[in-house]
Image (cartoon, rainbow, N blue to C red):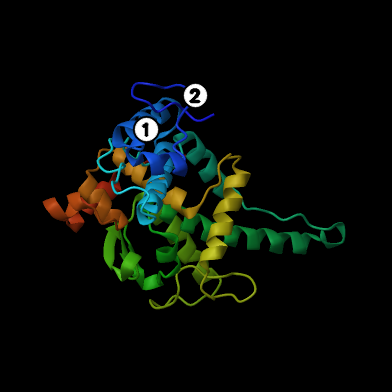
Amino acid sequence: MSPDLSRGGNKTEGFEPTVANLRRDPYALNKALIQDYVAFLEHKSKNSTVLHKVSALRAFTNYLHNEGIIEHEPTNGLRLPGKVEPEPRGLSDKDRSRFEAVFQQPWLPPLPKRKRAEETEKKVYESAVNLLTRDRAIVFLMLYAGPRVEETVHLNIGDIELGKNSGTLHIRKGKNFKERYTSIPLPARKALQAWLDTRKKLLLAIESKQPLFVRLRGNPGERLTVRAIQMMIADAGKMAGIKEPVTPHVLRHTCAFMLRTKGVDIETRSKMLGHSIETASRYGAPGMKEIEQAAHLLDDAEAA
């Protein structure tokens, strides 16, 4: 049964304002009646559900108005619950530790018995180590510097500068084609340097305009795809035993959360991660010095 929407009633019967009834008395459907209905819903439903049902009710009153059954709009000026936006989800420190630990040992595929020759096993191990080095660099860059997966894919070797005490990341193709520079914390710098060393060992091109992250199988040297990175991160999450799916955006949220818990102000966080927020434009954008200082706060945050 539908709830009783007479003034002050939160019953479970009534509220059947049929079209026939409304033709006799259009004002039977009024703002006070609907406001009581909203109050009833708030006692039993989430805010999002209340807003969804009121939206459907507005569509109904629009229909009644268009059909000439009512000449008033009873849903105008309703007091509605606020829409609560869920906080972006990132990895907890415990899950981040488990996730990072996955990249400490190479992911070795099972070998058929007929292929268990010592030489073959050595090649498989070396190949797995190279893949791990590349994937660790991808994950640690996304986790500690926070680039989007599309931004990561488009990086070239010349877009990163690695030093002992600092590092710079140049995002040429950010969201809405916006360009930005940000700083690279120590865990990501170490992982990136290891990957650059591996590229040299594998005789892969290291010119500045060459793609940073490339395939090592199939067509070695070809730029890695968004889908390949998404699948790798999802597989790592499963190997870590994390219940919820791990995606590139989860790593980005984790970076933002770590910066926030370290006390980095919202303006600097938004500049580092390429966010556009009203607060940042109102108070001005931070410079590279502030961004580099913020990145250093994650230098010792490696969980595994």
Left or right of residue 239: residue 139: left
Instruction: Please identify the quadrant where the N terminus is shown.
Output: top right
Secondary structure type for disc 2? loop
Identity, as a three-letter code, of the amino acid under mark 2: Thr
Secondary structure type for disc 1? helix
- The mark lying in front, picked from 2 and 1, is 2
Percent coordinates x, y for residue 12 in the rendering:
49, 24
Q: In this view, does 281 lie above or below 215?
A: above
C-beta proximity under 8 Å, tags 2 and 1: no
Identity, as a three-letter code, of the amino acid under mark 1: Val
Q: Which of marks 2 and 1 is nearer the N terminus?
A: 2
Mark 2 closeness class: few <14, some 14–19, many ≥20 residues within 10 Å? few
Residue at mark 1 = 38
Percent coordinates x, y for residue 76 in the rendering:
27, 43
Which residue appears at 54% of the width and 76% of the height?
222
**Residue lying farthest to the left in this orientation:** 283
Residue at mark 2 = 12
Pick the residue in front: 64 or 220.
Answer: 64
Which residue appears at 46% of the width and 42% of the height?
20
Mark 1 closeness class: few <14, some 14–19, many ≥20 residues within 10 Å? many
Percent coordinates x, y for residue 181 in the rendering:
27, 63
The quadrant holding residue 161 is bottom left
Left or right of residue 45: residue 125: right
For the image, the number of numbered tags is: 2
Pick the residue in front: 247 or 195.
Answer: 247
**Gap between marks 2 and 1, in whole Å?**
14 Å
Which residue appears at 65% of the width and 53% of the height?
107
Q: In this view, does 4 lie above or below 84?
A: above
Which residue appears at 40% of the width and 71% of the height?
157
Numbered badge on residue 146: none
Pick the residue in front: 67 or 216.
Answer: 67
